[in-house]
Amino acid sequence: MKCLQNIKIRLQKIFYQHKSGVNKEVLSRRDVIDYLATFHSKFVITSIDKTTSNIGVVCKNFYIKNILEECGLWPGSGNETYEVSNQNKGSIIDKLKQGVSFFNIKQSDCSRDDLPFIYSIIKMHKKPIKFRYIISSRQCTTKPLAKAAMLGLKLCQSQNQAYCKAIKQYTGINMFFITDNFQKIASDIQYLNSRTKANSISTYDFTSLYTKIPHSNLMLI
């Protein structure tokens, strides 16, 4: 906490104590540039899970250590989700490009010859505080394929939703439990309250549900 307080005091000193007669953009000032360079060498600024409009400051060494542990690259750590490849970056990119071209998908302007990268955001609502690890493929080689796959999966979801809706009309049993907004959940809770028959409501969070599914099984779905 003392470290964060010192950072706050220093930032206030830089941004709010202007010399008289100086009319320059704050981020163009040499003292600001030098301080931010020093700051970036020691800390990482990242968004906070569930509240993306807020940011957090994390020790850079600690941040990198946690990512290496997640990937199983830190001594004594291990993760079945990832495995080390002996191929160089260029060979992997070429292989991925061949896979994309197999589906007759052209490279778009938003893609480039690069690999996805991993980063993490802070889960402040957890005790102790944890990290959420995210693989970003915003501008990598597989971006066009991922975009096409997403559209296909959305279509499958819509088809399954329509199928479950038809089943509910005949049986009264809801077999579709996917929602993309809070309004549906709120209306369901309100319906349960109006009937005064619900004893309890529970929620569950499967932190490794998807990463633990073998790829060979996923291919069969």
Image (cartoon, helix red, strand yellow):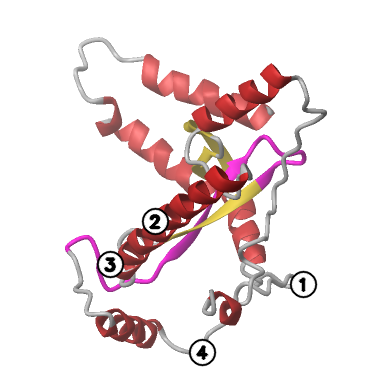
Cβ–Cβ under 8 Å for marks 2 and 3: no
- Badge 4 is on which residue? 86
What x and y, as percent, mark residue 126? 71, 39
Cβ–Cβ under 8 Å for marks 3 and 1: no
Image height of 208 relative to 219, above or below: above
Q: Is residue 83 visible?
A: no
Q: Give me the C-alpha separation between circle 1 and circle 4.
A: 20 Å
Q: Earlier in the sequence, mark 3 or mark 1?
A: 1
What x and y, as percent, mark residue 60? 57, 50
Q: Give me the C-alpha separation between circle 2 and circle 3.
A: 16 Å
CA neighbours of label 1 inside 10 A, class few (<14), some (14 to 19), many (20+):
few
Whether the magenta-drawn stretch holds residue 14 is answered as no
Q: Quadrant of residue 30?
A: top left
The region drawn magenta spans 109-130
Give SS at disc 2. helix
Res. 154 mark: 2
Q: Residue at x 46, y 45 (%)?
A: 40
Amino acid type indicated by mark 3: Pro
- Badge 3 is on which residue? 144
Quarter of the N terminus within the rendering:
top right
- Badge 1 is on which residue? 76
Viewer-nearest of discs 2 and 4: 2
Q: Residue at x 35, y 32 (%)?
A: 31
